[in-house]
Amino acid sequence: MASTPLLALACMDADLERIESALLASVRTSDAHLTELASHLIVAGGKRLRPVMSVVCARVGFDDHLDVAEQVILGGISCELVHLGSLYHDDVMDEAATRRGVETVNAKWGNLQAILAGDFLLSRASEIAASLGMEVAGLLARTIGRLCEGQIEELRHTYDPARPEQSYLSSIGGKTASLYATAARIGALVAGHDRSVVELLTRFGETYGMVFQIVDDLLDITATDEQLGKPAGHDMEEGVYTLPVLRTLAGTDGVAAELFQLLGSPLSPHDRHHALSLVRSNGGVASAASTARDLALEAAALCDDLPPSTATDALRAAPMALLDSVALGV
């Protein structure tokens, strides 16, 4: 997603500097090569939305200039490390050559080192979570399990044009939304919020994560190659059929039938362009965007029961702001 999400803008520069410093420190080891492997994607950049979620949720109900505890930063870092570790493993499975504008670890150093580096990031995440107490440690462990479940669900339906929509929703709930929910919950727990607030923020994080992924999948269909930094329709090419594609396939017109015939195996560049034109010309994009909008409104409504603060206002606006990034392509 090209633009900076509103959620990231809700953090002060000092918060972002603390997040970046702690993230780099978390993967520093006595082995220079392992440090280089583990920090490769960190150095390449990123919006750090999971630790940002932890910080913003910790600030709910407090003054926006509150200096959040180091434990909040560390809790968010643990989630970001799980995310990064999953990217290392994803790139091996996808045989990806680039990520964030740089060579992937697997392309540069080989699959074995990429897998081990990903494992190392997960171990560091677990170590940090354990330092924050048993509840956080157990929470992060369950989240890693949900990521695996989401990935398996996706793999089960690769190149399956008959993929049920519930399979897609379950997959993104595990692969994406669970980490946002955990980041929000950790921030709330470490900040000492009441349990009712912790539960609301957890639900907010989960719903925000669902919006985030649907929007990302919409952009893969609607944005240009230049905007994405990769070919549009890459997910279809890889056999991952996302919500706008599934909604198009669910149609009763000739477009649905034609798209069904195209999918089911790797696409040539010509067939990918044709498949994109079919999805873009149909109601699938608008239908998926409508679902994302409903979820964004649901997330915003949860904020009505949170203590008032600048952080609460930022959370309320953030899900709908994600949808604005799709406007260029729809």
Image (tube, grey):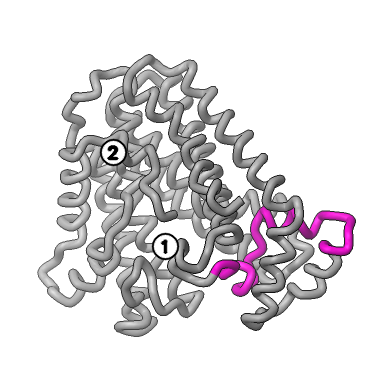
Residue wearing tag 1: 86
The image position of residue 183, as x and y in percent, is 38, 41
| Residue 249 within the magenta-colored segment of the rendering | yes
Q: Quadrant of the N terminus?
A: bottom left
Pick whichever, 259 or 167, lies toward us. 259
| Residue 127 within the magenta-colored segment of the rendering | no
**Label 2 Cα crowd, 10 Å radius (few <14 / some 14-19 / many 20+):** few
Name the kind of residue labelled 2 in the image: Gly
Magenta stretch, residue numbers? 232-256
User: Which residue does the image show at 61% across and 50% down from the upper left?
Assistant: 330
Please tell me in which quadrant of the rendered image residue 264 appears.
Answer: bottom right
Residue wearing tag 2: 133
User: Which residue does the image show at 23% across and 66% down from the upper left?
Assistant: 39
Name the kind of residue labelled 1 in the image: Ser
Q: Nearer the viewer, mark 1 or mark 2?
A: 1
Q: Earlier in the sequence, mark 1 or mark 2?
A: 1
Q: Relative to residue 235, is residue 307 drawn left or right?
A: left
Q: CA distance from mark 1 to mark 2?
A: 23 Å
The image position of residue 282, as x and y in percent, is 76, 56
**Label 1 Cα crowd, 10 Å radius (few <14 / some 14-19 / many 20+):** many
Pick whichever, 197 or 7, lies toward us. 7
Residue 24 numbered tag:
none
Pick whichever, 52 or 31, lies toward us. 52
Q: Residue furthest left?
A: 30
The image position of residue 241, as x and y in percent, is 66, 63
